[in-house]
Each structure stands twice: as structure tokens, then as C-alpha cells.
Image (spheres, helix red, strand yellow):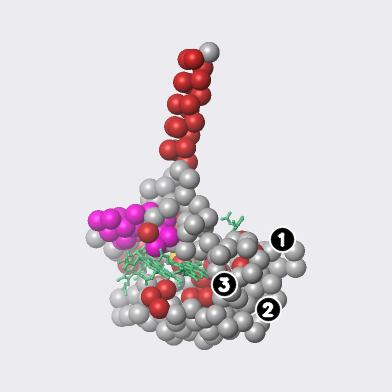
Amino acid sequence: MKKTKLFLTLSLVMLMSSFGFSQITGSDHDFSTENWNNTGEICIVCHTPHNADITVPDAPLWNHEVTQANFTLYDSPSFEGSATIGQPSGASKLCLSCHDGTVAMDNFGGRTNGGDFMTGGDLIGTDLSNDHPISFTYDAALATSDGGLYDPTTTNSGVGGTIDADFLLAGQLQCSSCHDVHNGAGLPNLLRVTNAGSALCLTCHDK
Ligand code: HEC
Ligand code: HEC
Ligand code: HEC
Ligand code: HEC
């Protein structure tokens, strides 16, 4: 009996440490106690089970007003991704629907007259020319032409599968390539993997 208990306790501890308990609750994306959110809920600011906004392709049951801003894109002479980069799409467009500062945080569930806009260090704005490029294709061909990138279809991401499977969305690099909006890893800045020693950067960049 005692042995069974010990075994169960040990298994539980092992299970807890292998999965971790990092989650959105208590993270910077837990809006349940914000004064601009009177629902007391977390998910509802971004998702709804019914009548979701389907204007952004692949948006997961989206419930937040979507940005209409026109963004200034990243460019540089050595940036090969310029061939496929476009206005922010997919998950990035959803992130920017708060982080560009043009849509109020409390504009969810059909509301469009909210007044709580993003300010301070978390504001990315509509000028993305000074930010890591997003919404472009990162594939084997890009890795070859760039010469300083790992092939995303064969290189391990460090969290289980390939870079393509774990970090890209439909073959594109997006905000979600580096960030986990739900705080799955429990790291500062909602990162997917630690950037200690620039580990995150060195997952994709062969430097
Ligand atoms: C700040 C906005 C935000 C909040 C709050 C949020 N999500 Fe998400 N969620 C997203 C975005 C953006 C995506 C798109 C995929 C991605 O970026 O990982 C997503 C994707 C998803 C998906 C599909 C992909 C996946 O990760 O499985 C599910 C399921 C999901 N969210 C559930 C939830 C639940 C449940 C909650 C509340 C506990 C929640 N989300 C809270 C923004 C949010
Ligand atoms: C290539 C990886 C990468 C991409 C893509 C990326 N980020 Fe980040 N982001 C980071 C890292 C790393 C940090 C931590 C910065 C630091 O420690 O100085 C960060 C920090 C942040 C912060 C915290 C404030 C700050 O500036 O330090 C916000 C907010 C943020 N990112 C939002 C976004 C949004 C929104 C997008 C998409 C438009 C995005 N990020 C795309 C890697 C990335
Ligand atoms: C509903 C609005 C909303 C959406 C959508 C949203 N965020 Fe945020 N995000 C916030 C707010 C508000 C904060 C700041 C919270 C605070 O400082 O209390 C924040 C903070 C952050 C931070 C800083 C975390 C830290 O530890 O400092 C990062 C990184 C970030 N968001 C990335 C993203 C990414 C990536 C997406 C899309 C996948 C996204 N956010 C979507 C509202 C949003
Ligand atoms: C998920 C993969 C991935 C991660 C993680 C990542 N990058 Fe990138 N990064 C890319 C790709 C792909 C490009 C496009 C390269 C090209 O087309 O020239 C790029 C472009 C860049 C560029 C611009 C290159 C140019 O020629 O203008 C810089 C600088 C850069 N990354 C630095 C970083 C840093 C610093 C980090 C860590 C904070 C980081 N990257 C994390 C994939 C990634």
C-alpha cells in the first residue's frame, strides 16, 4: 500500500515536471482582472465558441476586432524573404490587432467603441521596418539561397519536431514562430524556447 502511494506520488511528480504547468492563467495574456474586461474570463477577449470573425483566414474562432492598418514592412538588401513578404497575415495579423495600437483592447465580442489602447513597451506599432520580419515564406529554398539559415523542413526545432512543424504556420514565419500566445513554455516574453545564449535565434540562424 505504502509502496503504491509512493509510486503514484513519484509518477505524478514526473508527469508534472515533464508537462510543466505553464499556462495562460497569470500570464501577461490573462486579461480576466483587467478593468477593461468585465466578463472575468480569459479566452473571450480573443476567442468565442460561436459567431466568430472569419475574415482572417485560419483565425481560430476569433472574437477580437481585427486591425485594418497598413503596415510598413521590413526590408534590407540581404533579406531574401522580400520575395514573399506581404502585409501581416494569419496569426500575426491577430497579434497586431492589439499590439499595433490602432484597435482598442476592449473591442471584442462585436464591440467597436472601446477606449483602452496599447501603450508602452509592448506596443509594436504599424511601422514593422524595425522589427524581425514576419509573414513571409521560410522554406528549404530560402535556406539555400540565404546560406545562413537551417533548412526548416529537416532541422530539429528543439521542442519535438522540425522548425517547419513547430514554429511555422503554413510554411510562414509569424509572430507565433517565436512567441506562444498562451504562455505554453512559461518563459519571459511569452517565448517558445529560451533565448539564453541566443538559443531561440540560433534555432533557425546558422551563425
Ligand atoms: C491574447 C489573445 C488570446 C487569448 C487570450 C487566448 N488565445 Fe487562443 N489563440 C490566440 C491566437 C493568436 C491563436 C492562433 C495560433 C497561435 O498563434 O498559436 C490562438 C489559437 C488557439 C487555439 C488553436 C491552436 C492551438 O494552440 O491549439 C486554441 C484551441 C486556443 N487558442 C484556445 C484558447 C483558450 C482555451 C484560451 C483561454 C484559456 C485562449 N486560447 C486564449 C490568441 C489568444
Ligand atoms: C524572430 C523571433 C521573433 C518574432 C518573429 C517576433 N518576436 Fe516579439 N520578441 C522576440 C524576443 C526574443 C523578445 C524579447 C526581446 C528582448 O529580450 O529584448 C520579444 C519581445 C516582444 C514583446 C515584449 C516587448 C519588447 O519589445 O521587448 C512583444 C510585445 C512582442 N515581442 C510582440 C511581438 C509581435 C506582436 C510580433 C509579430 C508582429 C513579434 N513579437 C514577433 C522575438 C520575436
Ligand atoms: C487582445 C489583445 C491582445 C492580443 C490579440 C495579443 N496580445 Fe500580446 N499583450 C496584450 C497586452 C494587453 C499585453 C500587456 C500585458 C501587461 O503588460 O499587463 C501583452 C503582452 C505581450 C507580450 C509581452 C509579455 C511579457 O512577458 O512582457 C508579448 C511578447 C506579446 N503580448 C505577444 C503577443 C503575440 C505574439 C500575439 C499574437 C500571437 C499577441 N501578443 C496577441 C494584448 C494582446
Ligand atoms: C523561426 C526561425 C527564426 C528565428 C527563431 C529567428 N529568425 Fe531571424 N530570420 C529568419 C528568417 C527565415 C529570416 C529571413 C532571412 C532572409 O531571407 O534573408 C530572418 C531574418 C533575420 C534578420 C534580417 C536578415 C537580413 O538579411 O536583413 C536578422 C538580423 C535576424 N533574422 C535576426 C534574428 C535574431 C537576432 C533572432 C533571435 C532574437 C532571430 N533572428 C530569430 C528566421 C528566424
Task: Inspect the magenta stretch and tell me whether residue 199 lies in it.
Answer: yes
Residue lying furthest right: 51
Say which element carries label 3. Answer: loop
* First in residue order: circle 2 vs circle 1: 1
Instruction: Say which residue label 3 marks.
Output: 35
- Marks 3 and 2 sit apart, C-alpha to C-alpha, by 16 Å
Sequence-wise first label, 1 or 3: 3
Q: Secondary structure at mark 1?
A: loop
Instruction: Give the amino acid type for the residue marked by disc 1 in the picture.
Output: Pro
For the point 66% across and 82% down, which residue is it?
A: 112
Judging depth in this view, the residue of 155 and 184 nearest the camera is: 184
Q: Residues within 10 Å of mark 2 (few under 14, many from 20)?
A: few
Q: Position of residue 47 (x, y in %)?
A: 64, 64
Which numbered disc, 2 or 1, marks the residue closer to the eye?
2
Label 2 sits on residue: 111
The magenta segment is 189-206
| Residue hosting label 1 | 49
Mark 1 touching mark 3, by CB under 8 A? no
Q: Judge whether 138 appears above or below 161 on screen.
A: below
Does residue 10 show up?
A: yes
